[in-house]
Image (spheres, rainbow, N blue to C red):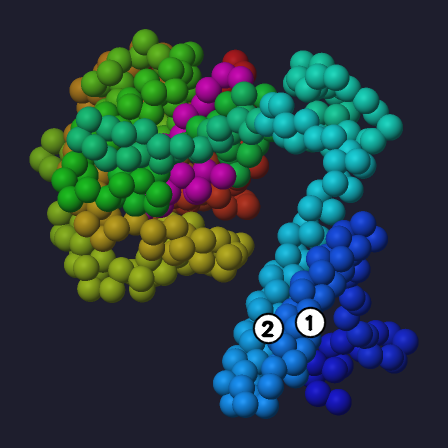
Amino acid sequence: MDWFGRLCRPRGGAVRRPRRRLLPASAAGTVTSRRSGLVDVCAGLIVGTAAAAASVPAVYAALVIPAALSGILFAALLLAVAVQLVIKALPAQRIQAAGHRAVAQSQVSTSGDLALTLPRHQETSAPVTGADRPETARFPAIRKKEKTMGTVTTTDGTEIFYKDWGAGRPVVFSHGWPLTADAWDDQLFLLASSGYRAIAHDRRGGGRSGQPWDGNNLDTYADDLAAVIDALDLHDAVLVGHSTGGGEVARYIGRHGTSRVAKAVLVSAIPPLMLKTSANPEGQPLEVFDGLRASLAADRSQFYQDLSGPFYGANRNGSTVSQGLRDSFWLLSMTVGEKGAYDCIKAFSETDTTEDLKKFDVPTLIIHGDDDQIVPIAAAALKSAKIIPNATLKVYPGAPHGLAQTTAYKDTFNNDLLDFIKS
């Protein structure tokens, strides 16, 4: 048996035959009567023509017989046309009959956003409005979904993507290089589940945000953050910045103040300055950052795989960092455009945020691991804690740069973050 026969065979073994769709008795009778009438007319034409041919003298047979044959052919053609008309009328008859049955069985109300079918035993003289529907009829499981993500268009036309989870006091996260907002998902989920409104955006140049050629610098990053905060009309917000995101938060406060900000958290953050200078001997030499740019331009995919090791401390003896976390780092990094990632190296390494830190006038928590191989603590947190008025510094022994995502330190960080927000 071919595949179609097997497909049509039911479980019992017999081959299914397509069922004939029968017309209602009234509709079938109408079609049958119309077809019978047309056939009778055609038959009458044929018989009449034959009778006329038989009644004429033989001398006229040569003239009458051809005319009779033409009449027969014409009648046959008329019969064929009539049959075609009857066949075409069948679908319309079926649809009309089905429509009559549906109207007889139910009435449909299309007021509001949903069409509700009313049982035929329920009578109504007017459409049922949304306000009059019982709660069960309004499908309580279907509700207008709150906006949990979107985009904000900046003054230079760049679209900045953000995710917005939960409700309550806003906590705004800025991610590190070369990642996206998804790096904060563990914390976003935790805070949204704890009664807060958790918001994170993709920095320009990567993720789901626009990738402009220009504007990949700390000033524009801060202005983009301001655009998100203003568009969502956030007040009494807690700003949390990791790595480059910490520099973004610092520059935001330096450029836009703290009128919408209640607290700030800097995590493994770049301020005040990563580059080694005569005034900042604890920084790293320019050659280090030139090497990052060269590796990125040569083979950014392999570069990100290699970078995930020191980023999470996976290159340390006894590390418990999973391959999945390193793969996630690579995946997020590859969504960042090469131009944005390349320019950002200069932004996070050579931008001095000392004057921005001096403008902090809100409670600030600084968290840093003393084994940070990306942003060494000596030129970062230890200095920032001395510049920001009344800052609180927490040093995690042995913690890497990406401490908020590693299983060894994530719970400690989450608890410290929640305690600080609640305080």
Front residue of 292 and 143 = 143
* Magenta stretch: includes residue 174: yes
**For residue 59, above or below residue 396:** below
Q: Which residues are magenta?
A: 168-185
Front residue of 192 and 122 = 122
In the rendering, at what x and y percent does residue 123 appear? 81, 22
Please tell me how crowded label 2 is: few (under 14), some (14-19), or many (20+) other residues with Cα within 10 Å. Answer: many
Determine contact: label 1, label 2, CB under 8 Å: yes
The residue under the point 59% across, 27% down is 113
Please tell me how crowded label 1 is: few (under 14), some (14-19), or many (20+) other residues with Cα within 10 Å. Answer: some
Relative side of 346 to 387, left or right: left
Front residue of 257 and 365 = 257
What numbered label is drawn on residue 75?
A: 2
Residue occupied by mark 1: 43
In the rendering, at what x and y percent does residue 322 appear? 52, 56
- Seen as rendered, the residue at the extreme left is 278
Q: Is residue 143 visible?
A: no
